[in-house]
Amino acid sequence: MLQLDMNSTGIKIQPTMYGVFFEDINQAADGGLYAELIKNRSFEFNEPLMGWKQPKTQYQSENPDSGYATVFSNPDKTNHNYVRISVNNDKVYQLVNEGFRGIGIRKEAYYDFSGILSKGEGNISAVKAELLDENNKVVSSAVIEIKDSGWHKYSAVMKASETVEKGKLRLTFTGKGTLMMDMISLFPQDTWKGRKGGLRKDLVQKLYDLEPGFIRFPGGCIVEGRTLANRYQWKKTIGDVADRELIINRWNTEFAHRSSPDYFQTFGLGFMEYFQLAEDLGAAPLPILSCGMACQFNTGELAGLEELEPYVQDALDLIEFANGDPAATKWGKLRAELGHPEPFHLKFIGVGNEQWGPDYIDRYAIFEQAIHSKYPEISIVSGSGPYSDGEYFEYGWKELKKLNPQLIDEHYYKSPQWFLENAARYDGYSRSGPKVFAGEYAAHSGSGNDGSKRNNWEAALSEAAFMTGLERNADVVCMSSYAPLFAHIDNWQWAPDLIWFNNLQSYATPSYYVQQLFSLNKGTDLLRIRENGKAMIGQQKLYASAVKDMLKKEVIIKIVNVDDQDKEAEIIADHLAVEKKMSKTVLTALKPDQTNTFGQENIVPKEYGEPIKKGKIFTAIPAKSLVILKMKYR
Ligand code: AHR
């Protein structure tokens, strides 16, 4: 029998309790959330024509004499390269872009095609753009006329006649002479909130449906970079997309289950877009910045303490960019010029991702001093390294505590068993020390980064059991996020992930629904639910937590049954004056290794209504299930 104590514990559930962690890993940004469909649109990849091919067509033999493309580079610009197309003797020359593992095209949908072009010598005065299906059948076509030899942006709207998952874009040039081109772009018009050059609608919708309390960005290891030069620098990610300097993605090949040499960051999804996204989601923005240490799993390159000034300045300027008054501050003015005069209400900033050891503490202390002397109201998230325990972890906590941080970021990618065994992890944490941000976690069932670690129900259920422990300790744990968030089915480096997508569709994993059920039912105040005076942390293979939502006047109980037997729960409560019925939401699966996939989401929450008799709750908790009970109180 479970005893629910209706007297408030006095512990508030923070609005940031359940959030999302975004990193450009697994093609999450370019070719994912950022809806651009052209890979290497600006010819800036290490191999400038990567992603572009001269097709064998009726016009060209294998050794085409119809023309060629030449790359020109200007090292002084941030957009270094452009391409000159040369067409020979009234022939037809073509270039095909393969997209990010293909281009997803929808029947009857409209697409904005554009390019920055300049006419050269001769008589090439038009470019034909065509969308092709997998068999090179044309499903959309448009022609743009080039007026003169100045660089201008040209655009055309294209409408598709078919749905194609792995399409291509073909450009055709006819005549004799040259034409220069840069920033060849194709966006669906149907983006999130219909924004031009915006974000992929179905993917943002999935985030929106999580009602996340915060969004952490831009990572992850890409914050740190393999080298310092390759770290994420927010100032290079704002302003005109054509001028955002591209870098190689830290996940380009390393740790990849397959090679991804075409993985770069165009920063079309940059800091302005991240802040805008946070605002759209109603989530607190949580940017994480480099602390002057490259990824310690790679080069571990260090900026000397005397070289740290630009890194610290980036943090200070970011706070001003997010919150500064446009009339009184340089960076606030820039934000307004970029279209957002209102502040983004930044309250949190992260210093370093998974750094550890004295090098990190030395650098963190400098950031802390600089940030808090200017912005004492900002909460700083510091890292405890990639470890959930052990020497480095203990050291990090011990030293950070001396520096009085607000939140310490803990990461754990562990087995489902570990998650069950750690449901009481935070019960013993000091109530007077820093708060915890469980910033990256996921249960990994299976071994090896070979695809066997897909998001199955066993993993999701163990996360749910663990999350009752996060919730029970809401006075210590103020933020948490599953990681990573997104993965493209044909280009991923890390699994499992919360949301999987291809070029047209996406699906939510069982772990997604666990996150969603906790987030949508987080309530406002923690209640105690116990058996014989003890929290439910695995007795009879049950885990439980309870909250009250003071605004909606609801009591919400979460029970996780990890047993393969159904259980009967009897819950009694002091002064439980509730209405005569409750809603019961059950998330379960037929087998532990079951998962969801495209078009087949079998593991989804199901909601029922159940009566409550004489203020007592008797209800079945099915084997291997997460159950949410919700009732109105008076
Ligand atoms: O989430 C994937 C990676 O795991 C992150 O980039 C890093 O912070 C952690 O090691």
Image (cartoon, rainbow, N blue to C red):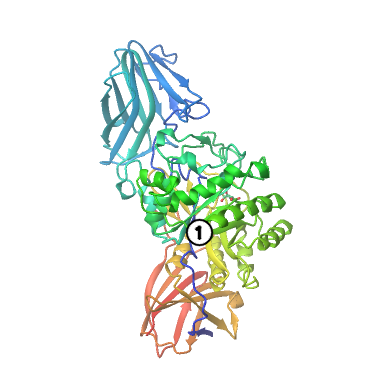
> Which residue does the image show at 34% across and 21% down from the upper left?
118
Quarter of the image with the N terminus is bottom right
* Position of residue 590 measured from the top left corner of the image (x, y, whole percent): 48, 64
For ligand 1, tell me if the residue under mark 1 lies within 8 Å: no
* Position of residue 13 measured from the top left corner of the image (x, y, whole percent): 49, 71
Report the residue marked by disc 1. 594
Q: Amino acid at mark 1?
A: Gln
* Position of residue 492 measured from the top left corner of the image (x, y, whole percent): 52, 44
Badge 1 crowding class, 10 Å Cα cut-off, few under 14, some 14 to 19, many 20 or more, is some
Q: Is residue 445 visible?
A: no
Against 442, is 476 above or below? Answer: below
- Camera-side residue of 95 and 75: 75
* Position of residue 123 measured from the top left corner of the image (x, y, whole percent): 29, 13
- Camera-side residue of 310 and 126: 310
Left or right: 149 as drawn, with respect to 571: left
Against 551, is 177 above or below? Answer: above
Direction top: furthest residue: 89
Question: What is the secondary structure assignment of the residue under circle 1?
Answer: loop
> Which residue does the image show at 41% across and 33% down from the upper left?
242
Against 559, is 407 above or below? Answer: above
